[in-house]
Amino acid sequence: MADKRSLWNEAGKGGLILGGISIAYLLLTWLMSKLTGDSIGMNFLVNMLGFVLWGLKLALCIIMMRRLILGFHSRNPESDSGRLFRYGFLIALYSPLLYSAFYLVYVLYINPEAVTASFDAVREMYSGSLDSATMEEIENMRSSMPTTTFFFNFIWCVLFGTVLSAIFSKKAAPSDPFAE
């Protein structure tokens, strides 16, 4: 029982680290969006910086997941790849739960204009090619968009984290096919 609790606690700490990285990225891009103005050059620079930050966030999350799994393995050398996978999978549950919950708060309270701006861009882009009934259906989706993004972010991050966990757990504790 204490061993399982230890696994969950350590995974929770790892999830907090990875979720914190994603939240920091979200807040940085939100603050950078405040810098944009009417200047095309400034908008381009902010967009490029946002893309670079996204790449850094992705790389940092991958590196941290690997380091967390390797660190868990070094503290628990008897752990096999199955236990390491469970540890990584738990991180892959905690981290997106934290990030998706924060993103829901972000979209609902911190920056509700983000959803409005997205729907306005879609309406402007497709207004000439879609009929009024379709445009009305798109508009009806606006109220459910925060909830939809919560679940989409959560599912996507869990799947991505699970794949990373599978890869890194196999590399950290390779199985010996000749062992009994």
Image (spheres, rainbow, N blue to C red):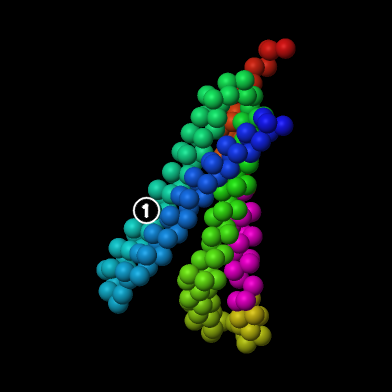
Q: In the rendered view, does 157 fall on the left or right side of 38?
A: right
Q: From this view, report whether residue 144 is shown above or below residue 27.
A: below
Task: Give me the residue at 66% from left, 85% from top.
Answer: 133
Q: In the rendered view, does 127 fall on the left or right side of 31?
A: right
Q: Amino acid at mark 1?
A: Val
Q: Residue furthest bottom?
A: 132
The magenta region covers 142-158
Task: Give me the residue at 62% from left, 47% from top.
Answer: 93
Q: Is residue 28 magenta?
A: no
Question: What secondary structure is the magenta-colored segment mainly?
Answer: helix
Q: In the rendered view, does 131 fall on the left or right side of 35?
A: right
- On the image, the x and y values in percent for residue 15 come to 55, 45
Residue linked to disc 1: 52
Quadrant (top left, top right, bottom left, bottom right) of the C terminus:
top right
Please state which of residues 112 and 180 is positioned toward the viewer in this rendering.
112
Task: Give me the residue at 42% from left, 60% from top.
Answer: 27
Q: Helix, strand or loop at disc 1? A: helix
- On the image, the x and y values in percent for residue 56 come to 40, 48
Quadrant (top left, top right, bottom left, bottom right) of the N terminus:
top right
Please state which of residues 20 and 36 is positioned toward the viewer in this rendering.
20
Please state which of residues 47 and 63 is positioned toward the viewer in this rendering.
63
Task: Give me the residue at 45% from left, 59% from top.
Answer: 26
